[in-house]
Image: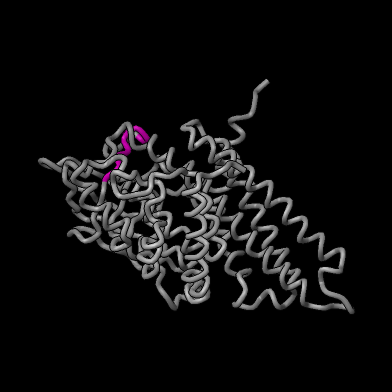
Amino acid sequence: MSTLAPQEQAVLDDARAFADAHVRPLAAAWAQGAADTRAVLPLAAQAGLLGIEVPVAHGGRGLSFACKWRVAEILAAADFGFSMSWVNTHNVARHLADSAAPEVARRYVPDLLAGRRTGCTALTEPGAGSDFSAITMQARPDGAGWVLDGRKAWIVNATHADVLVVYVQAEPGSGARGIAAFVVDGTREGFLRDPAADTSAARGIDTGGFRLQGYRARADELLHPAGQAFKAALGSINGARTYVAAMCCGMVAECLRVAADYGATRHSFGQPLQGHQGWRWSLADAAIDLQAARLLVEAAAARIDARQDAQTAAAQAKVFATRMAGRHIAALMHAMGAEGLRDAHPFLRHLAAAQVATLVDGSTEMLLERVARSLPRG
């Protein structure tokens, strides 16, 4: 594993303390829809977790992607949904700091870093998921600005986000070449929020949708014009695939820890569970695959930090890690017996989240095609 700078190691320590104090105690309530993850984001800001990759000049910490994916893993061990919610607000702050007009960045980034406002990135639509080039939300020039119309669905943080990076079609009929990206203010006229997604899986992810009806964007709120936005989105998606893989590692590590602790105290047939060879092997099998998944995440993250092409590495990491999580979380829950079904343990929450992870930021089948295209052709 790569070595982090001392200040980055300190961030990981802060993330662990934050997760223990503010995420684990609420995770079961979030899963039942009885609490709102948004209220915890200002506490994440106080812990310095909302500006990890944001440049220092914009009030962030200017640290590496390697640091961010490790924080994502730590938070997902406590709750996958919250980790996704946190990272999406963080990513919008970084995106605006890197790409927005100075006045636009000054308008939004400080509030995002403080957790006073929350962010999301909106690509998916009711009729366009993994096929990103098929989006139909439209932007048309109007005087000095633009008018945006259309609908987005299955967006992380959409139940509350009010600073949105929204991808639209600015040149209908041109596919990927016509896609542009705008900053959208969720408090402005023309923004209509849809109800939360009808699912109990990973509720902390705060998934929902919204509609833009005659929404007026100013000229300086164009983040990426047609011809540039699609490439920018693909770059950010590679990062997302990598940290989602890291989140899967975090969930398996947490389940492995809980099962190992239980196996040391629960007795069966006159000895602790860990005294049974078959029981030990199920944990050892999970530990081996967990290490392999982390190495794939590390390889993809290294390419991202080096600004190298990470498409294949990110796809490999996400496919392996999501499969690993689905298999081993279920096996570790089974190793716990009926005890594993209790809401006090993370198994059911993490098992559902592992299925969510196979779908976000590119389905497994889509990523297999990405890997297949990288294979040598004789």
Residue at 85% in and 64% down: 278
Magenta-span inclusion, residue 179? yes
Specify the farthest residue to the top. Answer: 378
| Percent x, y of residue 166 | 31, 48
Determine the image quadrant of residue 342: bottom right
| Percent x, y of residue 135 | 36, 45
The image quadrant where one finds the C terminus is: top right
Choose between 179 and 41: the one closer to the eye. Answer: 41
Choose between 325 and 271: the one closer to the eye. Answer: 271
Colour scheme in use:
one colour
Q: Is residue 155 visible?
A: no
Residue range in magenta is 175-182
Choose between 237 and 154: the one closer to the eye. Answer: 237
Picture layout, residue 28 above or below residue 9: below
Magenta-span inclusion, residue 278? no
Determine the image quadrant of residue 261: bottom right
